[in-house]
Image (cartoon, helix red, strand yellow):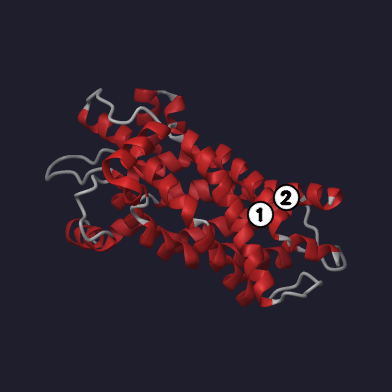
Amino acid sequence: MGSDNKNVDPLKNFVAGGVGGICLVLIGHPPDTIKVRLQTMPEPKKGEKPLYNGAMDCVKKTVKKEGFLSLYRGVGSMFVGVTPTSALSFFGNSIGKKMQTPSRSDGEYSLPQSFIAGSVAGITNTIVLTPVERVKCLLQAQEAAKLNKNVSTTEYKGSFDCAKQLYQKGGITNLYRGTVITVIRGVPTWGVYFCTYDGMKRLLKPKGFSKKLSPWRTILAGGTAGLFSWLIAMPADILKSRLQSAPSDRYPNGARDVFRELMRKEGIGSFYKGTTAILIRAFPANAACFLGYEIAMKVLNKLY
């Protein structure tokens, strides 16, 4: 079996993807906190100023009033959740490639094949991603509400308390609120994610050199994949964040109700609210993810 074929081994991808997920959280959680606060801040009343005037203003106000560590609030659930989510994403991507070319040994896939394989990842990771992001959105929105209303009460004491309360109030379906919109967001987003990464690897590979990229080229390819995938994901991500951070009875028809409310109150531009925070996070977080993944795969391929 060729060495490149080792890179589509599902088990190795699962392990290496988990390592990539840890790297992603370490780098990406603070800007993700800012992203959710911008996306879920209340619409200002007539004559009032918005709570935040962009990403940098949000960072300044958050750190000033709550301290730097507030940017990592909810990170516990992300470590618990993103590690298996990332593992399942790379696992799903490898399964998608093996399904299309089960006996391939040269490691070469067309960009459409890479997109299809990545789309599989958008399905396999949903089982973990949906409840993790539900908890994360609620915790981050809770802190934003406290800041806006200047109150000190805390409904959720942390990630596990939030998950426990959600289950007690509405069972497993309450934890998995937003599953449909997560899949709708995930399938094209993960397709673009892995397709862009594979395409960038080919573009950045010097002629006459091996298929292995240097670390800086991996960082550039991974960061670019993050940027392109998030540009695709943003509208659905706005819907998901609003739905998952709202009280359980607010949107009885799910994402459709969120969509109607956003269009009526804020217009089409609301679907790209928080763009700056998202793009600031997307490049370094996903660059770190792919760098961690590639290093882990290199170690695993040497060991097994």
Q: Name the side, left or right, on which 55 lies relative to 104.
A: left
Mark 1 touches mark 2? (CB < 8 Å) = yes
Distance Cα–Cα, label 1 vs label 2: 6 Å
Frontmost residue, 87 versus 151: 87
Q: Label 1 neighbourhood size at 10 Å, few (<14), some (14-19), many (20+)? A: many
Q: Is residue 295 above or below residue 68?
A: below
Quadrant position of residue 7: bottom right
x and y, in percent, of residue 297 in the image:
75, 51
Count the labels in the image: 2
> Residue type at mark 1?
Leu
Secondary element type, mark 1? helix
Frontmost residue, 156 versus 276: 156
Quadrant containing the N terminus is: bottom right
x and y, in percent, of residue 270 in the image:
29, 56
> Residue type at mark 2?
Trp
- Mark sitting on residue 216: 2
- Mark sitting on residue 157: none
Q: Is residue 188 above or below residue 261?
A: below
Secondary element type, mark 2? helix
Quadrant position of residue 225: bottom right
Q: Label 2 neighbourhood size at 10 Å, few (<14), some (14-19), many (20+)? A: few
**Residue drawn at 70 percent across, 74 percent down:** 109
x and y, in percent, of residue 92 in the image:
60, 62
- Mark sitting on residue 220: 1
**Residue drawn at 21 percent across, 63 percent down:** 260
